[in-house]
Amino acid sequence: MVQRIQHSYLSLPQHNKCFALISDAPESDVKRAIVFIHGFNGSAKGTWTDFLSLVDDPQASGDWWEAADLFFFDYQWILSFGSSRTTH
């Protein structure tokens, strides 16, 4: 059986509630970075929870993901866009 390449969790402390899953493949084999952004009415971790458990599951995902670093960003929608609304 071929050993699947996994991902390692990396906290991004400079960005509150954001994190990355970095491929354990050799750096020269990593071909892509995928960015997930959520913040309307959820969170980076909460919205993508099922995906996080599936990305390294050989039954659910293909080899394509092994050569990818994944970045999950969260932002507060109401703080970014809510204050720009005006009422008439």
Image: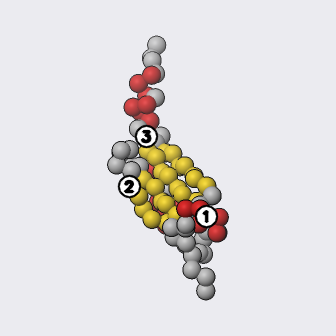
> Residue 84's x, y, as percent?
45, 22
Foreground mark, 3 or 1, reads 1
Instruction: Tell me which label, 3 or 1, sits earlier in the chain.
Output: 1
Q: Is residue 60 left or right of residue 15?
A: right
Q: Quadrant of the N terminus?
A: bottom right
Q: Residue at x 36, y 44 (%)?
A: 14
* Whether residue 46 is visible: no
Quadrant in which residue 82 is drawn: top left
Amino acid type, mark 2: Ser
Q: Is residue 59 visible?
A: yes
Q: Viewer-proximal residue, 85 or 36? A: 36
Query: Which residue is located at x 41 percent, y 58 percent?
Result: 10
Nearest to N terminus: mark 2 or mark 1: 2
Regarding mark 1 in the picture, which secondary structure is present there?
Answer: helix
Image marks 3 and 1: residues in contact by CB distance under 8 Å: no
Is 56 situated above or below 18? below
The disc placed on residue 75 is 3
The reply to whether discs 2 and 1 touch (Cβ–Cβ < 8 Å) is: no
Give the crowd class for mark 2: few <14, some 14-19, many >=20 residues within 10 Å.
few
Residue drawn at x 46%, y 55% as measured from the top left: 20
Q: Residues within 10 Å of mark 1 (few under 14, many from 20)?
A: few
Q: Are marks 3 and 2 in contact (CB under 8 Å)?
A: no
Q: Disc 3 versus disc 1: distance between alpha carbons?
A: 31 Å
Badge 3 crowding class, 10 Å Cα cut-off, few under 14, some 14 to 19, many 20 or more, is some
The disc placed on residue 29 is 1
Q: Which mark is residue 11?
A: 2
Amino acid marked by disc 1? Asp
Numbered disc 2: secondary structure: strand
Q: Nearer the viewer, mark 3 or mark 2?
A: 2
